[in-house]
Image: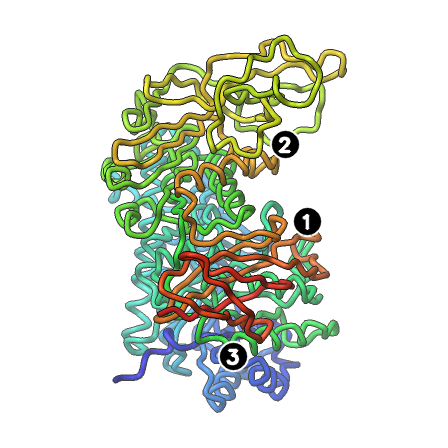
Amino acid sequence: MSEQPWYRTTLRWGQTNLVECDPARYDVDFWREHWLKTRVQGIIVNAGGIVAYYPSKFPLHHRAEKLGDRDLYGEIVKVAREEGIKVIARMDSNRVAQDFYEAHPDWICLDIDGKPYRQADKYVTCIGSPYYTEYLPAVMEEIIERSQPVGFADNSWAGLPRANICYCEHCKTQFSDYAGKTLPRAHDWSDVAYRDWIKWNFQRRTDIWELNNRVTSKAGGDDCAWMGMISGEVLNNSSRFIDLQAILKRGAIVMLDHQRRNAVDGFEQNTEAGKRLHELAGWDTLIPESMPQYQLGAPAFRLASMPTSEVRLWSTSGFAGGIQPWWHHIGASHEDRRQYKTAEPIFRWHEANQDILVNRRPIADVGVVWSQQNHDYFGRDRAPDKTLAPYRGVVKALDRFGITYMPLHADDIETAGKRFGVLVLPNFGTLSDAQLGHVRSFVANGGSVIATSESTLFDADGEARADFALADLFGVHRQAGSHGAFDGISGNLETHARHTYLRLAPELRSGVYGPKDDTAPAQSAQRHPILKGLESADTIPFGGYLPVVSIDDDVEVLATFIPDFPIFPPETSWMRTPRTDLPAITVKQAPSGGKLVWFVADLDRCFARDDQLEHAMLFSNAIRWALGNRSQVAISGGHGVITADLYEQQGKRILHLNNRLLLSRVPGRQYDLVPIGPVEVRLRVEGTKAPSVKLRVAGKSIPATAQGDELVFVVDEILDHEVVVVDVD
């Protein structure tokens, strides 16, 4: 068998992101020792672009301030090769200095008034200019000739972001050739030219990706790959015109520049990112991720140490999503030296357990559907609230209740029937006819679907249809009007527009402890399983957006809408309209046996924003009802902060249990780890009677009991994570 290429076998990475004074202080012996202690197999080394760390032959290729005629990049490459470590040449290449601008003003992006776009003291280069098609390829050829790196990475390769339109002559000509139109004058989604401009920019970045790979493979050999870098946040990629679906299908390895949790999510976002990207790139593709040892937060301190707990939780969350570790320092020398101790135990654990961290396939109950097109053409300028928040809310609810899920691209719904019991469409407005057909086939084959808000109401360009495209399937039809809005959090008690509720059916309060209520109907029926846990509540908070709908006769309504009323002063806080017939949650049984739930009230978006537990309960109940209580994993004792991600290898099940307890709301500031436990796990594993399971973090085996087709065991405590390995027949 021939040896596998480097991008299949290099699992641990390191990066000392050189700064311009490093040629005068780089300690070769220390960094060599650090590579060996942290067990890295590859390193990312600054080569060229904005700053060159070797004596380039190109006069405008700006050399690092302290470089002189030294080849620091080449020296680092030589030492790495002596240790058998692979080297990726790092580029940072979308800005140039004043002298470059004066030599090539036509390579620079222009605003509508013909003025160059600038970032600080640098000029932003145009993705359509010869800078990208001639100059940068020549620089890469020079680097390959000098040092033969295994590949190239570039974290600023995508050029000017969506917030700006370039009006240079290159863009005018190329857009005219692409769309037969002049460039749009403003960011206006109602303008067809603007939507074409969006599509052209996505295509242009994909073309650059392919061009760079042709250049590097021709100069450096078939396995010399150009990999750019991508973000783990979907809207960040959209803002930079990086088509994840197109790009990841073309990549040999994914260099992930996703360095920290954001201000609204916890560490679980790193697991989600890994799963979502693997679903597009393939589960055989490696995804190393830049994991900073310096303090990224609000504010960021580039030279300070990240708290160890923050790095551990981020790293182990990545492992649960199939991500490989990559330590990252800014600069080659630091007076805060705590950061040099953080990576070693994490990387050594990864090396000792790499057999179960790669070459595996995910198992999950739920497919949560997403696509960049839904964010771009339905979410448009309001994507963070309109489309991303509903997705986040669903994922957050599933994590809260330990339900296994995978992000599923809309183009892959066709495969869902072989993988999932339930699909979720979180305010998924834009489904193509082919994608809609795959949803129908999924239901026809017995699958269950949960849709929310305005799912399927829009075409591929975000234009409204006359009715939901799946109206006949769910028995839910769009009518004129809506209540509420996609607004954010407000603590102003004088503004009561979000003070809305849902009324649950049937009402049960006549039989529940409390004062006499003459308006309470006599209890007439049992509630639907989706409302489990809310038996003492006839109303729950809402506060979101409700499109007005009508329903068919075979649809059951589980909740209706209660409109807003004053809440301040408190004497005014009583329901003016306590009842309506506006459906908020509906259910229907498909002829195939599949279960169909429509959360007309956008509880997914509300949960992402408000963290209202009832909203998550309703989603988890809907999932478990749709699954028939035959979930892959069930967790108790985790207090809602232990999440589960399940994988399979030949003869094994691999279960990641991650502690998501968040002690600091500020990204980069988690100082402590708090153990959670004991946690009981019920794992559905057919064909095993294993008397024990192995805990790879605790380093021991614990007893397990077979109960039907479930294996039951208790993990005493989970500090940052635990990885359970079960042998199966």
Is 293 or 433 nearer to us in this picture? 433
Q: Amino acid at mark 3?
A: Ala
Name the residue located 24 percent from the left edge and 44 percent from the top edge.
177
- Residue 424 lies, with reference to residue 103, above or below; the image says above
Q: Amino acid at mark 1?
A: Arg
User: Which callout, 2 or 1, points at the residue further toward the start of the chain?
Assistant: 2
Q: Is residue 241 left or right of residue 266?
A: left
How far separated are the C-alphas under marks 3 and 2? 45 Å
Question: Mark 1 highlights which residue?
Answer: 665
Q: Which mark is residue 352?
A: 3
How far separated are the C-alphas under marks 3 and 1? 32 Å
Name the residue located 35 percent from the left edge and 29 percent from the top edge.
191
Question: Does any portion of residue 61 appear in the rendered image?
Answer: no
Q: Which mark is residue 355?
A: none
Mark 1 closeness class: few <14, some 14–19, many ≥20 residues within 10 Å: some
Question: Based on the displayed image, in which of its 4 quarters is residue 676 positioned?
Answer: bottom right
Of badges 3 and 2, nearer the viewer stands 3
Residue 187 percent location from the top left of the image = 43, 34
User: Which callout, 3 or 1, points at the residue further toward the start of the chain?
Assistant: 3
